[in-house]
Image: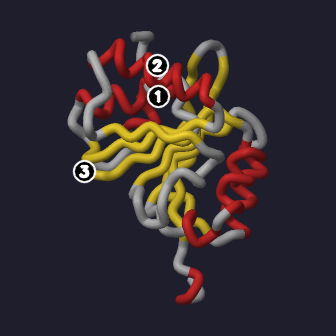
């Protein structure tokens, strides 16, 4: 398996012990594999929008772990679509543009707000994502910058506020 870089290490630090993790656009699955080896989460939901990347995810897990553990669920679909409302506690959306992350969050507000914590690592348009989060009443609870492969990567941790209470 490739080196677990500073970017993924920074993201991993924000994943709660005992949570159910949804990794949207899992790609190489390095983050869930590492967290699984640490015994961090009770379940891992790995998604991708197309069959090719999802097969890449499957192959990476098979190579690293000698099979797909029962705690892993690999699903194909767009954004949060393959996840049921309330199924995941922590959701990682990393390595895609801020505009794509906004589209994922806006697609199903009820499902999005059922997730307790989001960890974003936008490749572009970080400021637009932060404006969206503020406008839609998400609390940014932490931010960190990691340096990897010659570029700075912003990591944003956010939680939805309860709109019914007017917070």
Task: Please report contact status of discs 1 and 2: CB closer than 8 Å, yes or no.
Answer: yes
User: Compared to 165, does 68 lie above or below?
Assistant: above
Q: Nearer the viewer, residue 145 or 59?
A: 59
The image position of residue 141, as x and y in percent, is 50, 58
The part of the image, by quadrant, that contains residue 51 is top right
Q: Element at badge 1?
A: helix
Tell me which numbered mark, 3 or 1, is placed earlier along the sequence. Answer: 1
- In this view, the residue farthest toward the bottom is 165
What residue did someone put label 2 on? 5
The image position of residue 39, as x and y in percent, is 21, 36
Name the mark nearer the viewer: 3 or 1. Answer: 3
Seen in the image, is 66 located left or right of residue 79?
A: left
Q: Element at badge 3?
A: loop
Task: Please report contact status of discs 3 and 1: CB closer than 8 Å, yes or no.
Answer: no
| Crowding near the residue tagged with mark 3, few <14, some 14–19, many ≥20 C-alpha atoms within 10 Å | few
What residue did someone put label 1 on? 8
The CA distance from mark 3 to mark 1 is 19 Å
User: Compared to 118, does 33 lie above or below?
Assistant: above
User: Compared to 125, does 142 lie above or below?
Assistant: below
What residue did someone put label 3 on? 18
Seen in the image, is 28 located left or right of residue 48?
A: left
- Residue found at x 65% / y 32%: 50
- Residue found at x 51% / y 27%: 7
Q: Element at badge 2?
A: loop
The CA distance from mark 1 to mark 2 is 6 Å
- Residue found at x 34% / y 51%: 20
């Amino acid at each position: 398996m490739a080196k677990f870089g500073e970017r993924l290490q920074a993201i991993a630090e924000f994943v709660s012990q005992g949570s159910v993790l949804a990794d949207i656009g899992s790609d190489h699955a390095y983050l869930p594999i590492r967290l699984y080896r640490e015994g961090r989460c009770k379940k891992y939901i790995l998604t991708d929008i197309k069959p090719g990347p999802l097969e890449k995810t499957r192959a990476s897990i098979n190579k690293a772990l000698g099979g797909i553990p029962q705690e892993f669920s690999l699903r194909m679909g767009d954004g949060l679509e393959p996840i049921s409302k309330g199924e995941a506690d922590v959701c990682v959306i990393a390595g895609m543009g801020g505009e794509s992350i906004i589209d994922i969050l806006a697609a199903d507000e009820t499902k999005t707000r059922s997730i307790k914590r989001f960890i974003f690592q936008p490749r572009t348009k970080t400021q637009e994502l932060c404006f969206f989060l503020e406008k839609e009443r998400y609390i940014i609870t932490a931010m960190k910058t990691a340096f990897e492969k010659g570029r700075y990567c912003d990591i944003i941790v956010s939680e939805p506020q309860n709109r019914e209470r007017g917070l």
